Image (cartoon, helix red, strand yellow):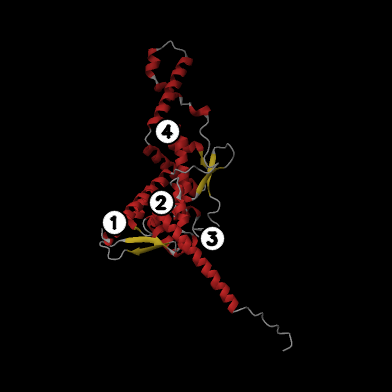
Amino acid sequence: MPRGQKSKRRAREKRRQARMETKDLGDAQAAASPAPTSGSVPPGPPTADAGQKPQGAEATSSPVAGASRPRSKARGRRQVKEHKNSSQASTSAKTTPPDLLAKKAGVLMHFMLEKFKMKEPIRKIDMLKIVRKMFKAQFPEILKKATDRIELVFGLELKEVKPNGYSYTLVSKEGLAKDGVLGSTLEVPKNGLLMPLLGVIFLNGNCASEAEIWEFLNVLGIYDGKTHIIFGEPRKFITEELVQEKYLVYRQIPDSDPLSYEFVWGPRAHAETSKMEVLEFVAKINSTDPSAFPFHYEEALRDEEERAKARSAGKAHAAAKATAHPKVPPSDPSSPQ
């Protein structure tokens, strides 16, 4: 096969691999697969109230049973009702589609972010109302999905306000706002989106079209033209704020028709993180190792080598400069000339 055709074939394969890995990144973030930080997820609902229902609901829950056994005692009716409720909960837990649970997690996540924005406590009783009775059995799973997604995208984790108080708040994870850390000049909830965006760009060959970026953001529930509770206007955030902070470069694609734009890493992204760190982040989201992305792992290793050489050259240059121009202490004006 001619060399030109081999090069084109290799390029197509890299693009296909990048699309697959970007989709995996979006799916993994949306599903929030990594386990939450210890202490970040509240305990499940107390068993004492798990089976309780309003009296009205009890009267209508099993009318046939009440009519067919008029002489049954209250205890018998209670046992039949409890068995029925248990069977319904078990069936619901087995048959609830994952997409429906993910949708409920998205609603719960939005509720928690609103409480965070208003600086109000997040009460468990209110979260259960958001989830509704028919999903009560799946509440721990829904809550885990919501808190994991908040931790990944916004850098926030759920903490208990008081022990066993069933009241919580979102707090920034330690280390995200320290000097020298990626995104340190942005508000804490906003800087959590930086690494995922840099990951999408890296996986797409170090530049991602605007369409590819929005496709990824849509998976996270962030849409163009729709105000977000944390990011505000998403387009302004990614094309202005992150560009002004020099984390991203937003530029026109040459000779594009119709006119199109793309994103690449900005100078601060290159200075404050590396391709290996971003790939490690992507691997963590996918519950795997960086080597699971062979094309990008090799590129990240080369980048690490180049960075190490640049650092060594910089140190050598500084040492040579210091030797050639030693500092002369200033003369004492009071000393005799």
Q: Residue furthest top?
A: 71
Residue placed under numbered mark 4 in the picture: 135
| Marks 1 and 2 in Cβ contact (< 8 Å) | no
Residue type at numbered disc 1: Arg
Q: CA distance from mark 4 to mark 2?
A: 37 Å
Q: Residue at x 48, y 62 (%)?
A: 305
Residue type at numbered disc 4: Phe
Looking at the image, residue 252 sits to the left or right of residue 34; the answer is left
Q: CA distance from mark 2 to mark 3?
A: 28 Å
Quarter in which the N terminus is drawn:
bottom left
Q: Please, is residue 275 above or below residue 131 in the view?
A: below
Whichever of labels 1 and 2 marks the residue nearer the N terminus, that label is 1
Whichever of labels 2 and 3 marks the residue nearer the N terminus, that label is 3
Residue placed under numbered mark 2 in the picture: 293
Give the class, few, some or many, for how many residues have Cα within 10 Å of label 3's Cα (few <14, many ≥20): few
Whichever of labels 4 and 1 marks the residue nearer the N terminus, that label is 1
Whichever of labels 4 and 3 marks the residue nearer the N terminus, that label is 4
- Where residue 313 appears, as percent x and y from the top left, is 52, 69
Looking at the image, residue 326 sits to the left or right of residue 108; the answer is right
Give me the disc on residue 180. 3
Give the class, few, some or many, for how many residues have Cα within 10 Å of label 2's Cα (few <14, many ≥20): some
Residue type at numbered disc 2: Phe
Q: Secondary structure at mark 4?
A: helix
Comparing labels 2 and 3, the label whose residue is closer to the camera: 2
| Marks 4 and 2 in Cβ contact (< 8 Å) | no
Residue placed under numbered mark 1 in the picture: 9
Residue 109 lies in quadrant: top left
Residue 2 lies in quadrant: bottom left
Give the class, few, some or many, for how many residues have Cα within 10 Å of label 1's Cα (few <14, many ≥20): few
**Residue 56 appears in the picture as rendered:** no
Q: Residue at x 74, y 88 (%)?
A: 336
